[in-house]
Image (cartoon, grey):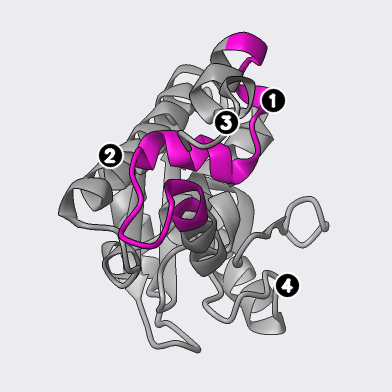
Amino acid sequence: MKDLPADQRPREKLLARGPAALADAELLALLLRTGTAGTGVLALAQQVLLRCGGYAGLLAAQPATLQGIKGLGPAKQAELMAVMEMARRALAQRLRDEPVFDSPAAVKDYLALKLGGHEREVFAVLFVDAQHRLLSLEEMFHGSLSQTSVYPREVVKRALALNAAAVVLAHNHPSGLAEPSRADEFLTQTLRSALALVDVRVLDHVVVGRGQVVSMAERGLV
């Protein structure tokens, strides 16, 4: 980046015009700081974003994905994972402090960060209190690439243990498509009936794909 005019270097551009003025690769290049032999830091940043599918994929990436990118040594991997975890914690704090449905976009962003990078299907439950503030997000069941076994009794037990008033169900589609299936609709109704017996509401069922998140409540399916 030393070959660039001063006003085109990411750091100088950010300080002069603000972070919104930077392209995606320029922002990431500031964090990576250095490239590798034959690959400048901007080119490395572009390669990372391409490999991960942009920032949405990068923030949800698993450590194994980062380890497989040439030019990302242990130090850079650690820095990226730290930034990802800070983003997750910031969203989690917001959901603890505010009612969940005061910030539906934050719920989707949080679930995308937590579930979007998994290569296998994961079923998670976001437990909330009577004011719909976050109590806990727990990955309860893990399955194959195509399906997972979900046991309503275990969800009910955990809801009672946390004294939850309601839940948001969530799972990922490793194939990348976030469109809810008929099986997803059936599972939602099954869990809704089981949880109703202990006076716990199902507020939503969120399906996370790669770069896409779908709320079944918004589709009228909950």
Nearer the observer, disc 4 or disc 3?
4
127 left or right of 56? left
Query: Which span is picked out in magenta?
Result: 16-45
Which residue matches tag 3? 100
Q: Earlier in the sequence, mark 1 or mark 2?
A: 1
Nearer the observer, disc 1 or disc 2?
1
Q: Secondary structure at mark 2?
A: helix
Spatial distance from mark 4 to mark 3, Cα to Cα?
22 Å
Q: Earlier in the sequence, mark 4 or mark 3?
A: 3
Residue 154 sits in which quadrant? Answer: bottom left
Q: Position of residue 24 (x, y in %)?
A: 61, 43
150 left or right of 205? left
Inspect the magenta stretch and tell me whether residue 42 lies in it: yes
Spatial distance from mark 2 to mark 3, Cα to Cα?
25 Å
Which residue matches tag 1? 21
Nearer the observer, disc 4 or disc 1?
1
Tag 4–tag 1 contact (CB < 8 Å): no
Name the residue rendered at 31%, 72% in the picture.
68
Which residue matches tag 4? 179
Which residue matches tag 2? 82
Tag 4–tag 3 contact (CB < 8 Å): no
Tag 2–tag 4 contact (CB < 8 Å): no
Q: Is residue 95 visible?
A: yes
Q: Amino acid at mark 3?
A: Val
Q: Amino acid at mark 1?
A: Ala
Q: Earlier in the sequence, mark 1 or mark 3?
A: 1
Spatial distance from mark 1 to mark 3, Cα to Cα?
31 Å
Nearer the observer, disc 2 or disc 3?
2
